[in-house]
């Protein structure tokens, strides 16, 4: 029954290598690309890239995007889509600011409000998509419209937070020992990260754990892989999808609060395009829109890559604003093509082009 | 005796908009028996099972399950509930998740855990795979396994869940003989442990080999429940069809007519190969000839005929038709030269689900006519009407979406599509698979009639008897290569087996 | 009459038409004069029709035209092209570039439009190749131009927002002297007629649907899925150029940031409200066009109710949700079952009466 090759490798004491899965392969490519890109940037343009603070600013400035992208990862793995992330973020920022300023709220209260708003949208999307079986694109589009519309209903003008307790939270910094740079005056300024970054990293780890080790997480993969099969395997598909949207909604709420911690202001123009950037982060990070494949670590690096490209463009002297979007577009194009080519090659079996560990297992009749 | 019965369904009725799928159907399953559920397409077998497993809610009736040695009424609302009650199903289409590993597919959706224990799962999965002799690794991603292995993993999952009732819905359609034997030994094992097995299949031979009792459904109603030993094949078929069997035996008398010996072959290929059929082969067929490709599942029959139709990308070969060199690089070329192909996978390659029966029937002819010349409504209706009558396609109207027709009628519609193109060479790949006995007979008669009119036909079927009845020449394949050819008197079941095995005839 | 009613309710157009009907009724109740058409004299001294109805039909023209292309793409490629608005900005930029470097006469306008078309068809084919040849999901593939498109337009404009003005352009974006109906409406109608002719006299409709429902079957019947998908993208490219040029003519300048901003969402919504499945397959162009008018009617209604423009989105969202909920198969099934229950009681009563 054992294959000849297995016998041989057993004799030699080697474990037969399990071919790498699609999810892990795409994630590896993303991580390598990011590291490669950053190292090249450090080498070619030096300057800012050698400054640890700039690296940490990638996290500081985009913590909310990382959080939203993680929520989106869960939804995309289950085969759905959510384009409301940016809208919910904006609504949360405005609502919390107004609450803190005009209604004498507490910080704790504002956190609850943020979560509540996120929960509301998560519930709405979840029920409409999972139980009423309406297409997620339309539902979350409506959700996005509703959120953005509500921002101006809450307050037409942008508002800045001046609430003391909140501001102290906003200004909280965690210093990273050992890293830092020499400022213009020659003094060593240690590198710092904001509170939001810690929250973002906790979210990433939490979602990663959920996806890998909890029943719910594995159900997401099953539902995304083949929802009909998942149903007959006894998974409650509707409930799984519902929870995915609910969770993503809560994460949008958290992301919104983190955004507020970073900018300190509520504004209808907050987080525009955030949902598309979240999708882009996911694509670069190896999450497939068709479902069943994806990984938050990949998404994290996808976000970092997306934002690094902008820094590289600026550093290389192309300062006109349109260059940034064009390069982002090119980067997306590159990753999309790369993914499609790799997956097609693995399927169709131009397998000889790939090294052993990249190849999927042999399809077709098993030899006994 | 009461205790013997593990499942009892009484007076089950279920309707869908416009269709009465089940009417007052009773079904009883005993412990440790293998019970066949049979009926033509549209008889209601699938619906009965889906009601039992909670995929559809029933309109009326009761279901009783043996719980703690006593029959209790149950109301199954979802496959999950069914699973927990001990009713497991393995479907014809692979209902596992291709992006998960074999081990995960065996355990996902079961039990009460919240945290996944990967090492335990892997170990248990490996044990089960070993015990049941399934050639797969626990950590292998499912979509890298062959269809047959995927099927076995699905069964392994059901087996591991200590089910009381195991439903196997057409499990053997994609398995070859060795794999079917493995499956049967598994089933006998379960039988000895007291599991009740419901076996839905079209393969008569298999039913007689392994089943104890049969329940026959027709048009949503119960015809009867019988002991296998009391029901000879002929009677079973007549009960399923509701008619007498002159037709089937009559066929034995008709022998396919001889070919025109002096003309060049209608179709001739030398060194034909495609990306799916890499072993180049030679093939020819004369006018009015009916030939068949036979061999075990996976031997390459479909791939070969697909190469003739250029359904897969052609990598080499010279084609001549009626003595002239022609280029056939894509399906349109084949169609222009009068070749028609009824595909093996009706669902994926054949029907356009949401379009009407009429649109499906005229499709091929329409494409041949050209982009800029659509048929008028009247023309299309005339064509559809003609063939609906000719082939006896059962449909509410020609505007009904073809997806709501039963499998057999869908097949007839696709056949109509190709007949409409008036081909000189028609390739039928498993035209009778998944089809009720009555339609099978009709199709075989049609094949012979077409041959008499001068159409060349290639007929592929997993039921050797069908091919023996209709073909005048058989090409035998093994492992993607042609290994032999049998003509006239040589064509017997034994000879075919021997040729496949590689022994002298 | 009964069977016509049955046919109408089963048709894909049932829900969009009903929604439109409700909107009309709502407005008539709220303000009986809402749809009144007045005859006025506009700035250029022409006699024109004006009023909310005209405003709705006029304002929806660009989205309606775009929705025609989007319907074909959705049907055959099973996904949406989210870059249409960005590409319209590119087309508009090319249009303006050609106009600014020449004296504006009718041949020049036609030439400018032609170049705009060529460019947008090329970009659309870029999307088309990614989707049809590389088999990438449409939404993912078009994300590239969605991100970069407006910046490309900006770059074409040399980093500015140039203006163009000429009476000829105003007449395209506004009124042709002597014709009281706004020109964009006329262009829209012409487009609709053209596409109807194409669908009627070719097999485009059939082939597109077959490709969308089952690509393999299309292949097995001699249809080339790649070709059909590319045709859909080409037609969309022409729609994009038309929409972009009309909008430029209407506002007299090209601002890459704001031209048809967020219009792609409205276009996708039109297609969905029109009863077309966003996952591809059967389609009905008129449904999408009706959808476009529903969205515009909604916007105009809200403005008439003095809702501030930034908040319009919220109300739009609610209406969309309501429409989509009622189109959902689950809800339809529920309605059908309750309807049947009400109906079913009758025969039983009769039987009991007979027995008694």
Image (spheres, coloured by chain):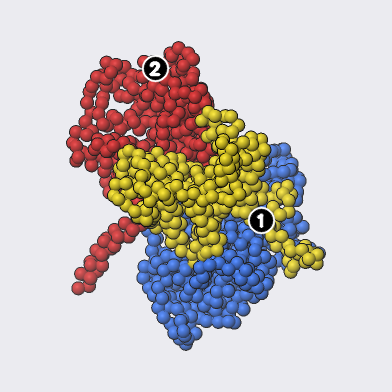
Q: Secondary structure at mark 1?
A: loop
Q: Nearer the viewer, residue B359 or A211?
A: A211
Residue B382 against residue A313 in the figure, above or below:
below
Whether residue C122 is visible to the viewer of this picture, yes or no, is: no
Q: Specify the quadrant that holds the C terminus of chain B.
A: bottom right
Kindly identify the residue that appears in the image at 69 percent across and 60 percent down. Answer: A18
Q: Colour of chain C?
A: red
Kindly identify the residue that appears in the image at 54 percent across and 29 percent down. Answer: A319
Image quarter of residue A213: bottom right
Kindly identify the residue that appears in the image at 27 percent across and 20 percent down. Answer: C42
Q: Residue furthest top?
A: C103
In the rendered image, residue B215, in percent from the top left (x then y), is placed at 50, 74
Label placed on residue A20: 1
Q: Nearer the viewer, residue A308 or B18?
A: A308
Image quarter of residue B54: bottom left
Whether residue A360 is visible to the viewer of this picture, yes or no, is: yes
Dot 2 crowding, Cα within 10 Å, few <14, some 14–19, many 20+: some
Q: Which chain is blue?
A: B
In the rendered image, residue B329, in percent from the top left (x then y), is placed at 67, 40
Q: Secondary structure at mark 2?
A: loop
Q: Colour of chain A?
A: yellow
In the rendered image, residue B349, in percent from the top left (x then y), is placed at 57, 50
Kindly identify the residue that appears in the image at 54 percent across and 34 percent down. Answer: A324
């Amino acid at each position: 029954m054992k294959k000849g090759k297995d016998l041989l490798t057993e004799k030699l004491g080697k474990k037969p290598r399990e071919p790498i899965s699609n999810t892990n392969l795409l994630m590896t490519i993303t991580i390598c690309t990011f590291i490669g890109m950053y190292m090249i940037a450090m080498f070619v343009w030096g300057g800012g890239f050698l400054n640890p603070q700039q690296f940490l600013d990638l996290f500081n400035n985009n913590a909310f995007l990382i959080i939203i992208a993680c929520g989106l990862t869960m939804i995309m793995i289950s085969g759905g889509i959510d384009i409301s992330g940016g809208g919910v973020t904006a609504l949360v920022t405005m609502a919390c600011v107004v609450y803190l300023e005009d209604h004498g709220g507490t910080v704790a209260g504002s956190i609850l409000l943020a979560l509540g708003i996120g929960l509301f949208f998560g519930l709405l999307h979840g029920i409409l998509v999972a139980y009423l079986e309406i297409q997620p694109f339309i539902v979350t589009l409506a959700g996005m419209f509703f959120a953005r519309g509500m921002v101006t209903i809450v307050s037409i003008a942008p508002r800045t937070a001046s609430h003391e307790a909140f501001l102290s939270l906003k200004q909280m910094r965690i210093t990273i020992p050992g890293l830092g740079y020499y400022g213009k005056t020659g003094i060593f300024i240690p590198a710092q990260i904001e509170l939001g970054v810690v929250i973002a990293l906790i979210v990433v780890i939490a979602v990663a754990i959920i996806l890998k080790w909890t029943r719910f997480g594995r159900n997401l993969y099953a539902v995304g892989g083949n929802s009909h099969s998942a149903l007959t395997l006894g998974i409650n598909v509707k409930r799984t999808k519902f929870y995915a949207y609910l969770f993503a909604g809560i994460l949008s709420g958290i992301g919104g609060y983190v955004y507020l911690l970073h900018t300190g202001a509520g504004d209808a123009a907050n987080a525009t395009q955030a949902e598309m950037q979240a999708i882009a982060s996911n694509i670069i990070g190896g999450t497939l829109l068709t479902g069943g494949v994806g990984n938050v670590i990949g998404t994290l690096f996808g976000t970092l890559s997306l934002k690094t490209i902008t820094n590289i463009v600026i550093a290389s002297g192309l300062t006109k604003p349109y260059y940034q979007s064009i390069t982002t577009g090119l980067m997306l194009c590159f990753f999309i093509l790369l993914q499609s080519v790799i997956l097609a090659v693995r399927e169709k079996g131009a397998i000889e082009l790939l090294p052993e560990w990249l190849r999927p297992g042999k399809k077709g009749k098993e030899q006994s | 005796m009461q205790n013997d019965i593990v499942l009892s369904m009484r007076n089950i009725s279920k309707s869908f908009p416009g269709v009465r799928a089940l009417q007052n159907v009773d079904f009883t399953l005993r412990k440790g028996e293998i019970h066949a559920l049979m009926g033509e397409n549209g008889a209601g077998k699938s619906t009965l099972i889906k009601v039992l497993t909670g995929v559809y809610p029933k309109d009326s009736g009761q279901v009783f399950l043996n719980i703690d040695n006593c029959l209790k009424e149950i109301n199954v609302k979802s496959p999950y509930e069914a699973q927990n009650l001990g009713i497991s199903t393995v479907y014809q289409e692979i209902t596992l998740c291709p992006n998960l590993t074999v081990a995960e597919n065996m355990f996902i959706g079961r039990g009460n855990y919240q945290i996944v224990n990967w090492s335990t799962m892997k170990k248990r999965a490996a044990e089960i795979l070993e015990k049941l002799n399934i050639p797969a690794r626990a950590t292998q991603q499912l979509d890298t396994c062959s269809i047959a292995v995927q099927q076995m993993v699905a069964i392994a999952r059901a087996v591991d869940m200590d089910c009381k009732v195991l439903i196997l819905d057409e499990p053997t359609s994609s398995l070859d003989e060795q794999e079917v034997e493995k499956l049967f030994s598994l089933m006998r094992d379960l039988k000895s442990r007291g599991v009740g097995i419901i076996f839905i299949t079209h393969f008569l031979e298999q039913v007689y080999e392994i089943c104890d009792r049969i329940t026959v459904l027709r048009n949503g109603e119960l015809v009867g429940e019988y002991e296998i030993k009391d029901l000879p094949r002929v009677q079973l078929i007549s009960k399923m069809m509701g008619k007498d069997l002159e037709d089937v035996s009559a066929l034995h008398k008709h022998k396919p007519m001889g070919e025109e010996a002096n003309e060049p072959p209608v179709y001739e290929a030398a060194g034909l190969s495609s990306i799916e059929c890499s072993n180049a082969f030679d093939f020819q067929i004369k006018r009015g000839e009916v030939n068949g490709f036979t061999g075990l599942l996976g031997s390459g029959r479909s791939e070969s005929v697909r190469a003739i139709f250029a359904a897969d990308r052609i990598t080499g070969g010279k084609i001549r038709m009626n003595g002239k060199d022609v280029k056939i690089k894509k399906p349109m070329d084949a169609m222009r030269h009068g070749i028609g192909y009824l595909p093996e996978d009706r669902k994926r390659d054949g029907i356009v689900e949401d379009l009407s029966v009429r649109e499906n029937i005229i499709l091929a002819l329409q494409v041949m006519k050209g982009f800029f010349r659509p048929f008028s409504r009247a023309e299309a209706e005339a064509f559809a009407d003609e063939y609906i009558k000719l082939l006896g396609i059962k449909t509410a109207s020609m505007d009904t979406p073809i997806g709501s027709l039963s499998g057999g009628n869908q097949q007839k519609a696709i056949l109509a599509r190709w007949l409409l193109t008036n081909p000189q060479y028609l390739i039928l790949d498993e035209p009778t698979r998944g089809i009720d006995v009555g339609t099978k007979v009709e199709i075989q008669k049609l094949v012979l009639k077409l041959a008499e009119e001068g159409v060349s036909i290639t007929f592929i079927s997993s039921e050797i008897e069908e091919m023996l009845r209709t073909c005048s020449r058989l090409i035998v394949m093994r492992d993607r290569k042609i290994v032999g050819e049998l003509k006239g008197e040589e064509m017997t079941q034994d000879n075919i087996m021997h040729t496949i095995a590689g022994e002298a005839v | 009459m009964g069977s016509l009613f049955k046919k109408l309710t089963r048709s894909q157009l049932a829900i969009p038409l009903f929604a439109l009907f409700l909107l009309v009724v709502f407005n008539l109740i709220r303000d009986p004069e809402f749809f009144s058409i007045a005859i006025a004299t506009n700035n250029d001294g022409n006699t024109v029709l004006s009023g909310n109805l005209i405003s709705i039909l006029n304002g929806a023209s660009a989205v309606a035209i775009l929705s025609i292309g989007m319907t074909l793409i959705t049907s055959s490629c099973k996904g949406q092209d989210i870059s249409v608005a960005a590409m319209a900005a590119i087309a508009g930029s090319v249009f303006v570039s050609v106009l600014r470097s020449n004296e504006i006469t009718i041949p020049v306008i036609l030439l400018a439009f032609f170049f705009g078309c060529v460019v947008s068809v090329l970009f659309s084919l870029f999307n088309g190749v990614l989707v049809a040849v590389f088999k990438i999901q449409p939404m993912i593939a078009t994300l590239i131009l969605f991100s970069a498109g407006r910046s490309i337009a900006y770059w074409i404009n040399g980093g500015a927002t140039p203006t163009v003005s000429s009476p000829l352009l105003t007449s395209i974006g506004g009124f042709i002297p002597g014709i009281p109906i706004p020109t964009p409406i006329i262009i829209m109608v012409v487009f609709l007629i053209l596409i109807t002719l194409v669908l009627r006299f070719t097999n485009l409709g059939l082939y597109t649907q077959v490709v969308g429902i089952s690509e393999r079957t299309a292949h097995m019947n001699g249809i080339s899925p790649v070709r059909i998908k590319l045709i859909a993208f080409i037609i969309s490219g022409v729609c994009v150029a038309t929409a972009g040029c009309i909008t430029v003519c209407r506002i007299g300048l090209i601002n890459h940031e704001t031209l048809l901003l967020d219009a792609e969402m409205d276009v996708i919504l039109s297609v969905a409200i029109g009863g077309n499945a966003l996952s591809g397959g059967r389609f009905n162009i008129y449904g999408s066009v009706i959808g476009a008018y529903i969205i515009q009617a909604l916007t105009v209604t809200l403005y008439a109710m003095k809702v501030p423009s930034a908040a319009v989105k919220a109300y739009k969202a609610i209406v969309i949700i309501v429409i989509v909920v009622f189109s959902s198969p689950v809800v339809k099934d529920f309605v059908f079952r309750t309807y049947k229950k009400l109906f079913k009681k009758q025969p039983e009563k009769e039987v009991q009466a007979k027995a008694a």
